[in-house]
Amino acid sequence: MSALKDKRMTIDEAVELIDHADLKTLGRMAKARKKELHPKGVTTFVVDRNINYTNICWVDCKFCAFYTHEKKEDAYILSFDEIDKKIDELIAIGGTQILFQGGVHPKLEIEWYEDLVAHIHDKYPTITIHGFSAIEIDYIAGRSKLSVSEVLARLKAKGLSSIPGAGAEVLSDRVRDIIAPKKLGTQKWLEVHREAHKLGVKSTATMMYGTVETTREIVEHLNYVRELQDETGGFRAFIMWSYQSDHTQLKRELPTILKSTSNQYLRYLAVARLFLDNVPNIQSSWVTQGSYIGQMALEYGANDLGSTMMEENVVSAAGASNSMNQDEMIELIKDLGENPAKRNTAYEILERF
């Protein structure tokens, strides 16, 4: 393991660490790397709101409990007035960002998305629009007979700032064929982010683990992220969370899938911090892990607590019910002797506490 200090971590080394390293040792290694990257001991968070503009989706991911179909009674597309109300509520608590995601609606085309982004950007110029996952972008392109680059350029021109990493799950086509057979493949996910980065549209990289993947597939996912980051430098952060199984088709089909443990989460997180030597920020997933493990994540390489999550509908539909406000985040960070700071989407510090 001493060689890890002298050269870039390999896939084999990362697999070995996840499977066999002592957990506390992993924590010390990841925390030391975090301190090298963030020597001032600042832990950041963002005040934002997830707005799921529609729950209508044709992709039918087996791990998702949020989506519905167009003709179902609970199907919706939010009106601009409904979206405005949500943004007004966000601004009232000092929010700076909206995370826009929906189901992949089978009929919405580029003009609808342009109108939406332009409306928000013009009416709320202080709010950053961080929105639309790779599969949404890819589907809009196909539906509207445009290239991915054209869709991204048009949305950027209307006010889209950055895109989230959602839809990555585990970047293994074997895994994706089991848990989301209609979803775009590994290379297409990477291509959408590559095209975004070329246009100056930054993004985040994510991973949802805990279904049918192997340790090696977890690390290969990290390697895809690291390689694209070497190429473009466009990822601002890496965020990982565990599969939430309640009310999902995957749980019905594969009831033997074991619920992920906190030990597993911290192992993956620590190795992600060590392996992703070119990604500046690692986010804690307190939403799926709870506030205690969310805090522990700061000892295992995370330097960001993510969002206060004024609204979250997707993982909550699958059983996660954790919540935390700004004051609770500040106290949690201070409790570890770190310095809390509110940030914006670009990880620029807005306020220190």
Image (spheres, rainbow, N blue to C red):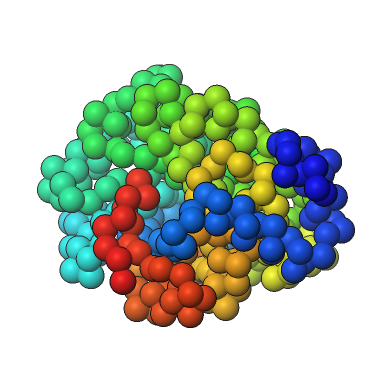
Query: Is residue 117 shown left or right of residue 304?
Result: left
Q: Give 176 or 39, whichever is nearer the viewer.
A: 39
* Left or right of 22 on screen, residue 109: left
From this viewpoint, is residue 328 visible?
yes
Horizontal arrangement in the rendering, residue 206 relative to residue 323 (left or right)? right
In the image, residue 25 sits, relative to residue 205, either above or below, namely: below
Residue located 24% across and 29% down the image: 157
- Asked whether 141 or 326 is in front, the reply is 326
Residue 215 x %, y % = 80, 50
Viewer-proximal residue among 92 and 313: 92
Q: As drawn, which residue projects farthest toward the left?
A: 123
Question: Residue drawn 41% across and 80% down?
Answer: 331
Q: Who's the residue at 29% across and 26% down the image?
A: 154
Q: Give how far across and how far down residue 87 sits, in percent.
A: 22, 59
Quarter the C terminus occupies? bottom left
Q: Position of residue 293 (x, y in %)?
A: 60, 73
Percent position of residue 198, x then y: 42, 23
- Inspect this view and state whether residue 133 appears: no
Tell me if residue 296 comes above or below residue 127 in the rendering. Answer: below
Report the front residue among 10 and 75: 10
The structure residue drawn at horizontal position 32% and vertical position 25%, both measured from the top left corner, is: 153
Number of numbered discs visible in the structure rendering: 0
